[in-house]
Image: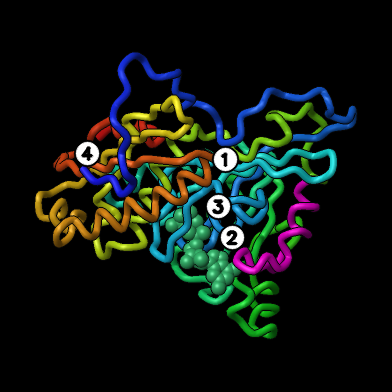
Amino acid sequence: MIDDTIPEPDDDGPLPGAPADAAVTDTAPKDTAPKDTRAGFVALIGVPNAGKSTLLNSLVGTKVSIVSRKVQTTRALVRGIAMEGNAQIVLVDTPGIFAPKRRLDRAMVTSAWSGAADADAVCLLIDARKGVDEEVDAILKRMPELKRPKYLVLNKIDLIAREKLLALAASLNERVPFERIFMISALTGDGVDDLRRELAGRMPPSPWLYPEDQVSDAPLRMLAAEITREKIYDRLHEELPYSSTVETDQWQVRPDGSVRIEQTIFVERESQRKIVLGKGGQTIKAIGQAARIEIAEAAEAKVHLFLFVKVRENWADDPERYREMGLEFPRG
Ligand SMILES: Nc1nc2c(ncn2[C@@H]2O[C@H](COP(=O)(O)OP(=O)(O)OP(=O)(O)O)[C@@H](O)[C@H]2O)c(=O)[nH]1
Ligand SMILES: [Mg+2]
């Protein structure tokens, strides 16, 4: 158990009700909505590492989905809410689409396509510097199946020369009937406002689906688990991030307003548990410190974070773990 804050003595008596299921910003819907409102869903799809989660955060204006340099970071559908004029755009970040091998991979890819099938519009993100490889090609082939308005979003334009970008856009335009093509940098924000405006105009007339100041539909305890998982991705290499999952077990608000959080990191083998702990507990301490700072920002409270590492050989075959992640458990 690692806690890099100074724990206070445990209080006797029951703690006040934990708002662990509160949404990231949880306020009652206000009656300030204008009459001609629009609202709908936009799915962001693409291969792993295309920049979908970075774009989601940029469109929303705050971090609601975790990001890493490694592939296959996002595991389940993450919804972020962006407001543009009278429109509320519920953006659905999806796991990267690739040829799945493991059960978890299959669940992630299925979840990505289902997110796209249910949306009012779909944005296909392509890493413009990487262009069209085999994985992108496989998605392009399936695009006609999606009977939805489709946008092509060429991302990472900060990394590529203009002529190459235009050539890529032209060749893709011939392959799939996209409504429009956007060239953006999700990282610098270049082109993101234009995209948000276009998507806003695409939303059907509808009352807003969430309070206008809400940024995500995820409970805080889930965001907190994701933040810790991101710190694992930042610090550990090779198969470790893919062999681990994080769950928030406890979320207790203390009388002084601080929050005591307990999370479990599940890994598949004892050797992995040792790596996550690190020499003298250094690695887990660094993960915990980085996670605590960001969870405290999201929770807007002082946080005491306790991390446990458990070996659960078959967590990737355990339906319970999938439920926690918000994924369907693929049978067989
Ligand atoms: N230079 C540059 N890097 C970017 C841009 N957008 C995203 N990245 C980087 O690309 C990497 C992957 O970004 P993510 O947003 O995690 O990608 P993703 O598509 O959500 O990946 P998965 O969840 O694995 O499918 C991160 O290191 C980002 O910082 C961009 O516009 N420019
Ligand atoms: Mg992602």
Residue 99, how many percent across, how many down? 37, 55
Q: In the picture, residue 162 is in which quadrant?
A: bottom right
Q: Mark 1 or mark 3: name the one nearer the start of the chain.
A: 3
Q: In the picture, residue 80 is in which quadrant?
A: top right
Q: Mark 2 or mark 1: name the one nearer the start of the chain.
A: 1
Amino acid type assigned to the residue bearing label 3 in the image: Ile
The magenta stretch spans which residues? 182-200
Q: Secondary structure at mark 1?
A: strand
Amino acid type assigned to the residue bearing label 1 in the image: Arg
- Residue mark closest to the camera, 2 vs 1: 1
Identify the residue shown where x is 53% and y is 52%.
Answer: 142
Q: Is residue 235 visible?
A: yes
- Residue mark closest to the camera, 3 vs 4: 4
* Mark 1 → mark 3, Cα distance in angstroms: 13 Å
Residue furthest right in the image: 35
Residue 146, how many percent across, how many down? 61, 45
* Mark 3 → mark 4, Cα distance in angstroms: 26 Å
Disc 2 within 8 angstroms of ligand 1 (CB)? yes
Q: Mark 4 or mark 1: name the one nearer the start of the chain.
A: 1
Q: In front here: 171 or 70?
A: 70
Which residue is tagged 2? 125
Q: Mark 3 or mark 4: name the one nearer the start of the chain.
A: 3
- Residue mark closest to the camera, 1 vs 3: 1
Which residue is tagged 4? 315
Which residue is tagged 1? 79
Q: Residues within 10 Å of mark 4 (few under 14, many from 20)?
A: some
Q: Secondary structure at mark 3?
A: strand
Number of marks in the image? 4
Which residue is tagged 3? 45
Identify the residue shown where x is 84% and y is 43%.
Answer: 85
